[in-house]
Amino acid sequence: MANFELISFANADELAARAASAWLDEIAAANHAARPHCVALSGGRIALKFFTSVVAQTKAREISLGLVHFFCADERCVPPDDAESNFRAAHELLFAPLRVNDAQIHRIHGEDSPEIAAQKATMDISHVAPKNSAGQPVLDLIFLGMGEDGHVASLFPGKMEGKMPADIFCAVNNSPKPPPDRVTLSYAAIAAAKNVWVLASGAGKETALRESLSPSGKTPLARVIQSRFRTKILTDIRPG
């Protein structure tokens, strides 16, 4: 049996709306059980549509986000008000419109060096999320995008081979995509999450998605899928 679930959509708007609805169902269930919900968000073009849809549906359904803790799956090493900042996009399109309390937002300090920012992010998440026996935080949900090369978060092909299995957040230097310095959740941290939903959208990614879904795939997304019992792939791409 495949260790991923592939859910196809006609276009990016439909993908974003359905992903937002499903996530709010998860939050509503956590609220009903009076338990925190720890989530890591990613950037990218599909994330902008997703955030907008989350805001609209949250208001329509009158769902409280008061028990949600927001983390970043990755961040570019730029100030938080920079146009390249993943935090800025989430703040402008999600946190500010829904008036999320600052205490629930755990941003990566991209204005610092990647090494220092990774250390701070690791300490922050370690104080909030429960851990497994390997010392990894167990997030309720991680959202990932996918690039044309199959990268997820800031895990690029061939870039993280020297990282230790115990790493939670990792510094990334000389990224193949600008800006070169970044911070990302590690493969081990992603593997430890209860749920991982990949929002794979956009032209030119058919080959990467097809390889990522192969049992012998070598892309970063393939590595994530192979490390987990189940990963949900929501996509408007036809992998062939």
Image: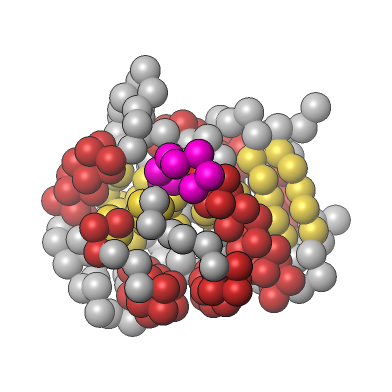
**Could you tell me residue 88's position as x and y percent?**
33, 75
Left or right, residue 63 beside residue 89: right
Number of marks:
0
Q: Nearer the viewer, residue 92 or 154?
A: 92
Which quadrant is the N terminus positioned in? top right
- The answer to which image quadrant residue 226 occupies is top right
Classify 212 as above or below 147.
above
**Could you tell me residue 217's position as x and y percent?**
66, 39
Classify 123 as above or below 42.
above
Q: Residue at x 38, y 57 (%)?
A: 66
Q: Residue at x 44, y 41 (%)?
A: 34
User: Is residue 233 rendered magenta in the image?
Assistant: no
Classify 92 as above or below 226.
below
Classify 41 as above or below 119.
below
- The answer to which image quadrant residue 145 occupies is bottom right
Q: Nearer the viewer, residue 181 or 97?
A: 97
Furthest residue toward right: 240
Q: How has the structure been colored for display? A: secondary structure
**Could you tell me residue 98's position as x and y percent?**
41, 73
Q: Is residue 31 visible?
A: yes
**Could you tell me residue 78's position as x and y percent?**
24, 71
Which quadrant is the C terminus positioned in? bottom right
User: Is residue 36 rendered magenta in the image?
Assistant: yes
Magenta residues, start to end: 31-38
Furthest residue toward top: 133
Q: Residue at x 52, y 35 (%)?
A: 194
Q: Residue at x 17, y 48 (%)?
A: 120
Q: Nearer the viewer, residue 179 or 17?
A: 17
Q: Is residue 181 visible?
A: no
